[in-house]
Image (spheres, rainbow, N blue to C red):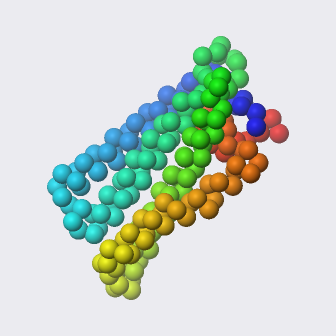
Amino acid sequence: MDNNSCLTVHEGRIYIVINSLFASLGSLANLATIILILWTKAYKKHVHRLTLYLAVFGLCFSLAVGFEVVPVDANGSNNDTLKVREGWNDACTAIGFVAQHIGLSRSLAVLLVCFYVFLLAICQVKLKQRFYEAAGVTSVVVIPSLLSWVPFINHTYGLTGVWCWIGDDCAA
C-alpha cells in the first residue's frame, strides 16, 4: 500500500487540527460522563451501567480518532503530498486496525443498548441477570474481530486522507 495521501500538507494540517479538536472534545465529554457515573455510584443501576459502557467505548473511539493522525508527516512544504512519517507504516497499520475495531465495537454497543431498550419498552422484558450483561459486553468486544481483520488480507490498512485507516488509492 502506498503511504501517500492525495491531500497536500497544507490541507492535512487543517484536517489534523480539526480532527484533534473533535477527538479532544469527545474524549473530555466521555471522560466526564465516566467520572460522574463512578463518583455518584450511579453504575449500581442497570441503565447507568449501559451509559457507562457507551461512554467507555466512546472514550476509546475518541482516543483512537486522535491517534489516527499521529503517524502523519505534515512537516513538508504546503504543496507537498501528505505521507506517513518515515518508519511509521506499521504503526499506521496498527492504529488503523484499532480504530476500525473500536469503531465497530462502539456501533455494536449502541445497537445492543437500543435492543435492550426495545425489549424493555415494547416487550417489557427485563434482563437483570449479570450473565446477559457480561455476554453483551463480551460480544461487543469480540464480534468486531470478525470484520476488522479483513483489510489485512490485501494490506489495505494505511493512510487515507490524514487518517490511518483502511487505505484508498486516491490516484485511481
Task: Residue 160 in the image: state x and y as whole percent.
Answer: 66, 38
Viewer can see residue 168 = yes
Above or below, comparing residue 63 to residue 3 in the picture: below
Which residue in the rendered view is the most extreme toward the top? Answer: 77
- Residue pictured at 23% horizontal, 55% vertical: 37
- Residue pictured at 60% horizontal, 16% vertical: 75
Left or right, 163 with respect to 53, comes to right
Quadrant in which residue 166 is drawn? top right
Q: Quadrant of the N terminus?
A: top right
Which residue in the rendered view is the most extreme toward the left? Answer: 40
Q: Quadrant of the C terminus?
A: top right
Left or right, 79 with respect to 66, comes to right
Task: Residue 141 in the image: state x and y as whole percent.
Answer: 48, 60
- Residue pictured at 40% horizontal, 47% vertical: 59
Task: Residue 78 in the image: state x and y as whole percent.
Answer: 65, 16
- Residue pictured at 65% horizontal, 25% vertical: 87
Task: Residue 116 in the image: state x and y as whole percent.
Answer: 39, 74
Viewer can see residue 160 = no
